[in-house]
Image: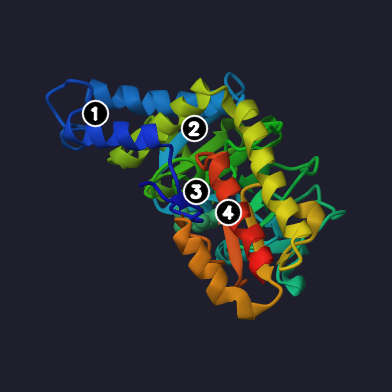
Amino acid sequence: MKKHNFSAGPSILPQEVLRKSAEAVIELDNSGLSLLEISHRSKAFVDIMENARSLALELLGLQGQGYKALFLQGGASMQFVMVALNLLEKRAGYLNTGTWADNAIKEARIFDDVYEVASSKEANYNYIPKGYEIPEDYDYFHCTSNNTIFGTQMKSFPDSPIPMVCDMSSDIFSRNLDYSKFDLIYAGAQKNMGPAGTTLVVVKEDILGKVSRKIPSILDYKVHISKGSMFNTPPVFPIYVSMLTMEWLKKMGGISAIEKINDQKARLIYSEIDLNPLFEGFTVKEDRSTMNATFNLVNDNLKETFDTMLKEADISGLNGHRSVGGYRASMYNALPLDSVKALVEVMSELETKA
Ligand SMILES: *Cc1c(COP(=O)(O)O)cnc(C)c1O
């Protein structure tokens, strides 16, 4: 029996995607060959890559606007480095909203000057700073749309006078936004798109080629674009699974359709957190993430009972990150509403027991 999977990442994928992926490992589309044993330059795989690249732009509503989609390696963490290498000439502005944002700042500082436009570090990142200014003479502004560890999410984005770069690892394809506000978006596949091993990068081509430093080919967005995201052997399996997940999303109505379900799931869990006196949310209410809900037991004595009840209800992956503690329910696109219902039931059952 499939468990209710609230894992923060790698995380739940649609059942039909898992099944099709497993089949393709044995034999890809009646070809007599496994997806894993064909050339990445074969027509079969080039078609998969091109389909994945165009689906990403289509779902984000960014086709025909000068954007290119790439599937790279090295995780979102590699993008902390590539963004700075490719875009940072003198100074960049970063919004520090969590551990991942903080890591992005550390990496960029290796190359040049980084200014924190605002930070919520002093409050253990339980809110999103607002009302900050983005200097016009900086190279770019970097933000993190969803803070996976702390459970906060940017509900609106500034009108940036300079190119805007966003780490969307944990909420890519989850909600309607004007994605054309961003000049570079990146997202590790393993939260909301596919297995670990590839990172989606969507970049507006005209922001590239403006820094004076030499960039190693493998870290140069322009090289990856010119090679159709095949500069070196791409991670074929995670790209294939990501393509299937994007097809699944498109078939069910795209981002608008999944956003409605994501909102329902979030409303359900947060209303339980607010109404049930045994629990308290970790973040301020207005910045609560629809993807990762972080909460604590008011009385830690109930932890053993609650954990046992979760286990009996086949609920998995609910432990909070070590820097926050408590619980974190990750409710990515593929998590069914029923799983959140199951969790909320256990939470309210605890109240009747306590
Ligand atoms: C998980 C995560 C990362 C790190 O991703 P890796 O692929 O492990 O490098 C970066 N940013 C955010 C927002 C994340 O959730």
Establish whether ligand 1 lies closer than 8 Å to the Cβ of label 2: no
Lateral position of residue 206 relative to residue 215, left or right: right
Q: Does any portion of residue 298 appear in the rendered image?
A: yes
The type of residue carrying mark 4 is Leu
Q: Earlier in the sequence, mark 3 or mark 4?
A: 3
Q: Nearer the viewer, residue 138 or 79?
A: 79
Q: Residue at x 40, y 53 (%)?
A: 74
Amino acid type, residue under disc 3 in the picture: Lys
User: What residue sits right under mark 2 in the picture?
Assistant: 69
* Observer able to see residue 230: no
Q: Is mark 1 within 8 Å of ligand 1?
A: no
Question: Which residue was labeled with disc 4?
Answer: 343
Q: Residue at the location (71% across, 66% down)?
A: 279
Task: Give the Cα distance between marks 4 and 2.
Answer: 36 Å
In three-dimensional space, the C-alpha distance between marks 3 and 2, rounded to whole angstroms, equals 18 Å
Considering only order in the chain, which callout, 1 or 2, is on the residue closer to the N terminus? 1
Residue sitting at x 49%, y 48%: 191
Residue on which disc 1 sits: 41
Q: Earlier in the sequence, mark 4 or mark 1?
A: 1
Q: Quadrant of the C terminus?
A: bottom right
